[in-house]
Amino acid sequence: MTINLLPHQHQEERKFVGFVNEIFFGVFAILIFMVIAEILFYTYNRSLEGKVAASTQKISTIVTNIAGYSKISAKLDKVQSKTAKMNTLKNNPAPQSQVMAMISQSVTDKIQLTSVISDMKAKTVIVKGYSISSDSLSLMQSTLQTDEMVKEVSLVLDPSSTTEKYVFTTKITLSDK
Amino acid sequence: MKNHIKNLFLLLFIIALTYSALALLVVTPTVTSIADNQSKLAESYAKISDLENTQKELERWKKNESVLDVMVGNADHLWPAESSIDTFTTKVRKTAVNNGVNVTKFSFGMPKDGTATYELEGTSSYSNIFQFVDGLGKIDRFSTIPLVEMTSPDGSLINLKISGQIYYGN
């Protein structure tokens, strides 16, 4: 490919040649820009590669250091594992001793219990008994309802109840807390 | 003139081709590599941070190894490696005696999957039984009580039935 620049060329051809030269200049400028950009990218990338290599080395060093604490690490794992197991079993549902304390606190002298079945798997406590006072039963129910272990309380009077002896069954549903 | 225009298009085509080749073969791989290395570096820094924290934690425990040994001892005591039930049985009976509960049955099932179940039956008053169940929770071997049944057929002494579990293993 050649571009004729002889003196007898037409005015339009000269303009054309000037236009082509401008294109060449532009192309050359872009080329220079790309080369500079590539040099900068390359330099930055080399720097990154160096940092990656250094960090990999650092990881390797720390891992080696940690391996030196294997005895301590094993002890910690043991404690954490057993504590986690105990927390899982202890926290859900609430322990029986707390349930017993809760029932004990809610029952007044005027209430006689005949049966308490506390089932932690079903998260329910069935309390049966009788009372000589309906107020005592209301008090028991309201006391149970305020306990944070309790999700729901239902109290049902037996048909055999009289105004002197209220036979009841209370179903307590325990919360997941 | 037509020839010039033809040459111009040819020139532009060659330039475009050259730039495309340059971008595709030189610049793009470098940019991709930069992105890849930046990602690797971020991951490495995060990992280093985690590992350094772990190392600091281990160094701290190394300085306080005696405290850690006590914690391990307590954990082993609460949750022993063996399914041995002798000590637990003794402590349950002692708790029963201390709280006035007359134990009529106390039997263990076959240990299985790190658990040994037990059934306990006894008689006493409600207040004694409440105290006894509370005492069971304070025995220094971890156990759970899935089921407690108390009945008073004649309104006097309370019959108690407990289904419990003790745990073992590492």
Image (cartoon, rainbow, N blue to C red):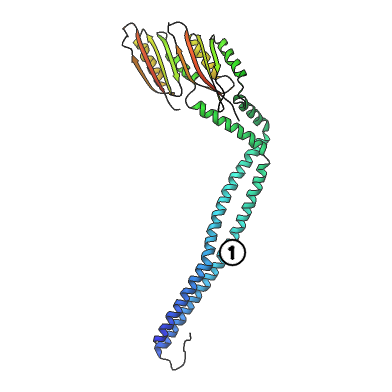
Horizontal side of residue B123 vs A43, given as left or right: left
Q: Does residue A129 appear in the picture of this structure?
A: yes
Horizontal side of residue A41 vs A13, given as left or right: right
Q: B27 and B25: which one is in front?
A: B25
Q: Label 1 is found on which chain of the structure?
A: A
Q: What amino acid type should be assigned to the residue bearing mark 1? A: Thr
Horizontal and vertical percent for residue A119?
45, 21
Task: Give residue B58's quadrant in the image.
Answer: top right
- Quarter holding the C terminus of chain A is top left
- Give the number of marks: 1
Which residue occupies the extreme front position in the image? B110
Q: Is residue A49 above or below residue B15?
A: above
Q: A105 and A11: which one is in front?
A: A105
Residue hosting label 1: A43
Q: Does residue B126 appear in the picture of this structure?
A: no
Secondary element under disc 1, as helix, strand or loop, is helix
Horizontal and vertical percent for residue A24?
48, 79
Q: Is residue A139 above or below residue A76?
A: above
10 Å crowding of disc 1: few (<14), some (14-19), many (20+):
few
Q: Is residue B20 above or below residue A103?
A: below
Horizontal and vertical percent for residue A45?
57, 61
Horizontal and vertical percent for residue B78?
60, 24
Residue that appears at 54% across and 67% down: A38
Horizontal side of residue A129 vs B59, given as left or right: left
Residue that appears at 57% across and 53% down: B41
